[in-house]
């Protein structure tokens, strides 16, 4: 990256090479970070964030689970996400807010460790390349997802991605685009960085949120679009053999968007081509960004837009993730620490 790339670091925009941390950072030793992956799309109306507020809501939820006090209000994080895209003059981007326990001494139990907040915006095309059109060849991983009483799958935390790395690295070594993990109970779970959908007997199915998956925002968007399109849909536990019976299959996530799967363990999915349900959902999803699909849900927001008043969850919006997020009072309580106030004050003074 060039030094012209700006990174938002604790309230200030810095050149790429200046956004550094100390080697004693707690997150480096113990994985104590929470993060998001968000996309900005170049739409006919200009650059638009996709579900920014939902991502920020999940960021605060993840931080809450791990007891990390984010030193900013959610609205400030939203504003900063927009600011970093604008500052880098980008029309589309992958945006990565990251909050982590920083420097302040070693020891598993964080003591005086400061909490650092950074937001990066990078150009990022299709995560699985050509597979978006042709379908990806995936395998079932020998690594399982963590059992529910080990790591909280609803939280998106850095340390948890060691498991994802094992899954993805093993898949890559075997010549596959991605690995699909089973849960602790042997039932289907998700990809290293994606949720999983199957079409079985014409019904769109996905493992439930209690199966050890990250409650993906793209997953929720796919479910919403499928219902809007009148598709039959079910959340249910699925055994591994469903992978070899499904007519269609795809994985989805902010990075992967909607990527069809054409084979699992070298066994073709259906006839090995991308099926009609997957194509219809891809059309509806990507249509949001080129104007073919009306954004009835207020998912797209511009870079200059203020934060909408319904940040705490509008019951009109079918956002399943809202079931797991803290309300505003909890968020305020979570940011009342001394460091938090100092950071917030200095940011407000500079804005
Ligand atoms: C393990 C895992 N599951 C699912 C997803 C999809 O989540 P989202 O659609 O919110 O990006 C991701 C991507 O962040 C992920 O890392």
Image (cartoon, rainbow, N blue to C red):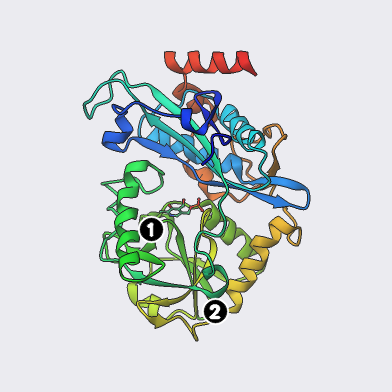
When asked about the image quadrant of residue 302, the answer is top right
Write down the residue under mark 2. 202
Q: Is residue 79 visible?
A: yes
Give percent across and percent down for residue 222.
58, 61
Q: Is mark 1 within 8 Å of ligand 1?
A: yes
Q: Position of residue 337 (x, y in %)?
A: 43, 16
Secondary element under disc 1, as helix, strand or loop, is: loop
Extreme front residue here?
2
Q: Residue furthest bottom?
A: 271
The residue at the point 34 percent across, 54 percent down is: 164
Residue furthest out toward the right: 45
Q: Nearer the viewer, mark 1 or mark 2?
A: 1
Note whether 95 is above or below 243 in the view shown: above
Is the C-beta separation of discs 1 and 2 under 8 Å? no
- Foreground: 91 or 157? 91
Q: Which residue is mark 1?
A: 192
> Which of the two residues, 157 or 175, is positioned nearer the viewer here?
175
């Amino acid at each position: 990256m060039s030094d012209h790339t700006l990174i938002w670091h604790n309230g200030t925009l810095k050149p790429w090479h200046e956004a550094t941390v100390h080697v004693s950072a707690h997150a480096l030793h113990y994985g104590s970070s929470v993060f998001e992956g968000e996309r900005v799309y170049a739409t006919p109306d200009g650059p638009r964030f996709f579900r920014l507020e939902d991502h920020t809501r999940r960021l605060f939820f993840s931080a809450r689970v791990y007891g990390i006090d984010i030193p900013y209000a959610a609205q400030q994080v939203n504003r900063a996400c927009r600011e970093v895209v604008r500052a880098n003059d980008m029309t589309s981007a992958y945006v990565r807010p990251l909050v982590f326990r920083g420097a302040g001494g070693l020891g598993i139990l964080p003591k005086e460790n400061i909490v650092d907040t950074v937001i990066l915006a990078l150009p990022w095309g299709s995560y699985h390349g050509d597979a978006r059109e042709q379908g990806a060849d995936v395998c079932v991983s020998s690594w399982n997802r963590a059992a529910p009483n080990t790591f909280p799958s609803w939280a998106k935390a850095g340390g948890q991605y060691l498991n994802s790395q094992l899954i993805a690295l093993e898949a890559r070594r075997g010549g596959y685009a991605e690995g699909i993990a089973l849960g602790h109970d042997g039932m289907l779970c998700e990809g290293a960085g994606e949720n999983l959908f199957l079409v079985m007997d014409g019904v769109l199915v996905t493992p439930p949120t209690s199966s050890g998956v990250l409650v993906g925002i793209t997953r929720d968007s796919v479910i919403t679009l499928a219902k809007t399109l009148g598709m039959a849909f079910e959340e249910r536990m699925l055994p591994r053999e469903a992978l070899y019976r499904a007519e269609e299959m795809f994985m989805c996530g902010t990075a992967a968007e909607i990527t069809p799967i054409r084979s699992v363990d070298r066994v073709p999915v259906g006839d090995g081509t991308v099926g009609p349900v997957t194509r219809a959902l891809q059309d509806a999803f990507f249509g949001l960004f080129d104007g073919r699909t009306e954004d009835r849900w207020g998912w797209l927001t511009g870079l200059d837009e203020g934060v909408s008043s319904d940040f705490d969850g509008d019951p009109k919006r079918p956002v399943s993730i809202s079931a797991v997020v803290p309300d505003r009072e909890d968020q305020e309580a979570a940011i009342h620490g001394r460091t938090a106030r100092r950071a917030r004050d200095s940011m407000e003074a500079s804005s």
